[in-house]
Amino acid sequence: MTHVVGELEHPGVEDLDLVEVLQALGDPVRLQIVRYLASVDGRIACHEIPIPVSKSTGSHHLKVLREAGVVRTDVEGTRKYPTLRRDDLDARFPGLLDSVLGA
Amino acid sequence: MTHVVGELEHPGVEDLDLVEVLQALGDPVRLQIVRYLASVDGRIACHEIPIPVSKSTGSHHLKVLREAGVVRTDVEGTRKYPTLRRDDLDARFPGLLDSVLGA
């Protein structure tokens, strides 16, 4: 499957850093985003994620998750579609995401 | 429930919070402390942990780890002996510590 990743940068799987990933996950709103993304089938837009913060704060949290490599954000036109980088995280830090999602 | 060990407070296992634990682990020096504690057999004193920071900075990091419930610190006289709360973390967040230590 081919993803168009507009103008947004994403770290390669080999560049994922454990401290950055833990910091990205160590926030209640970001954990909520990650859990929601893990729970949905198919593609959803950023604004469809139910989080109790403003649009700009939500965008900031998604940026932190993207820059840490937790989330991949595809851009199409003016819309952004974030997905969890589950395979990349599992490859780099086996068991980490499962333990966080299971907690 | 809070357990007092010497004069230091420790959260009970039921009060361990995932966000706090992730934040505590999401620091390079604290990860170094956790990895060192996981690697040693027997009791060691705080000042024996090899970390590249000042004594006061090291104490701060150990306090963050203790307050998050990652480390238990026993006090004897003027000495502090930290140990990893491996069983408590494994009980509350199965697989988390192993995935972090294995990364």
Image: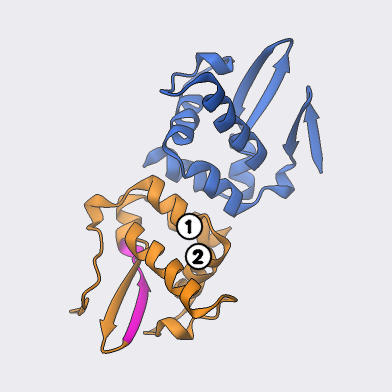
Chain colours: A orange, B blue
Dot 2 or dot 1: first in sequence order is 1
**Which quadrant of the figure has residue B78?**
top right
Q: Is A91 on the left or on the right of A33, as rendered?
A: left
Which residue ends up furthest to the top in the rendered image?
B77
Which residue is under mark 1? Answer: A25
Quadrant into which the C terminus of chain A falls: bottom right
Q: Secondary structure at mark 1?
A: helix
Residue A73 among those drawn in magenta: no
Query: Bounds of the magenta span?
Result: A79-87
Which residue ends up furthest to the bottom in the rendered image?
A77
Q: Is B65 on the left or on the right of B103, as rendered?
A: right
Q: Position of residue B77 (x, y in %)?
A: 74, 10
Residue A39 is marked as: none
Is B32 placed above or below A21 here?
above
Tag 2: amino acid: Arg
Q: Position of residue B23 (x, y in %)?
A: 53, 48
Is B19 placed above or below B45 here?
below
Which residue: 52% across, 18% down? B41
Q: Position of residue A36 (x, y in %)?
A: 50, 74
Tag 1: amino acid: Leu
Chain to which the residue tagged by mark 1 belongs: A
Nearest the eye: B34 or B52:
B52
Tell me whether the residue at label 2 lies in contact with that at label 1, contact meaning CB atoms closer than 8 angstroms. Answer: yes
Which residue is under mark 2? Answer: A30
Q: How many numbered marks, from 0 up?
A: 2
